[in-house]
Amino acid sequence: MLLLKIIFACFFIYAGILHFIKPKFFNHFIPKGLPKLTVNYVAGAIEFILGIGLFFPSVTYHAALGIFILLVLFLPIHIWDATKLRPAIGSKKLAYIRIPLQFILMYCAYLLYQNSLSIL
């Protein structure tokens, strides 16, 4: 479980940083009508903070729960992206692969959450 926690923490920290380094990459994931730069930076900050939180046992419970909720909130965006003529992720195939991958990530976040409960 420690390895999963480290992988998840590094993944979310890296993803959060990418929102600030390459904000234009995420523009196509953000629905029209929303302030793209603001939404992008907020999502990046949340991902970064939750990733860091996994390294601290006292807040791992909250960080894992936050990651799970974030992944649930991002799921409709990934489904919407897969239905677009030109998905932001690249090909249609990648866009459709991403959907079941999202469920796997949600399950892993749930496992981290459950494991942190047993430590409390």
Image (spheres, rainbow, N blue to C red):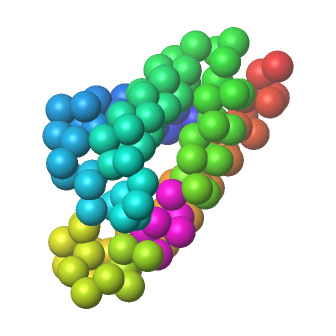
Principal SS element in the magenta part?
Answer: helix
Q: In the image shown, does 55 or 118 lie closer to the viewer?
A: 55
Position of residue 35 measured from the top left corner of the image (x, y, whole percent) = 38, 48
Quarter-of-image position of residue 114: top right
Nearer the observer, 117 or 72: 72
For residue 8: magenta? no
Q: Residue at x 61, y 57 (%)?
A: 72
Quadrant (top left, top right, bottom left, bottom right) of the C terminus: top right
Q: Is residue 43 above or below residue 35?
A: above
Question: Could you tell me which residue is drawn at 25 percent across and 68 percent down?
Answer: 88
Q: How many marks?
A: 0
Residue 94 visible in rendering = yes
Image height check: is 3 above or below 81? above
The answer to whether residue 77 is magenta is yes
| Left/right of residue 74 with respect to residue 66 in the rendered view | left
Position in image of residue 104 (x %, y %): 53, 61
Quarter of the image for residue 44 reads: top left
Identify whether 119 is placed above or below 111: above
For the view shown, which residue lies furthest in the front direction?
33
Q: Residue at x 31, y 41 (%)?
A: 37
Q: Residue at x 67, y 18 (%)?
A: 59
Quadrant of res 1:
top right
Question: Looking at this view, is 85 or 112 the one in front?
Answer: 85
Magenta residues span 74-79
Q: Is residue 87 left or right of residue 97?
A: left
104 in relation to 15, above or below: below
Residue 107 falls left or right of residue 5: right
* Left or right, 107 with reference to 16: right
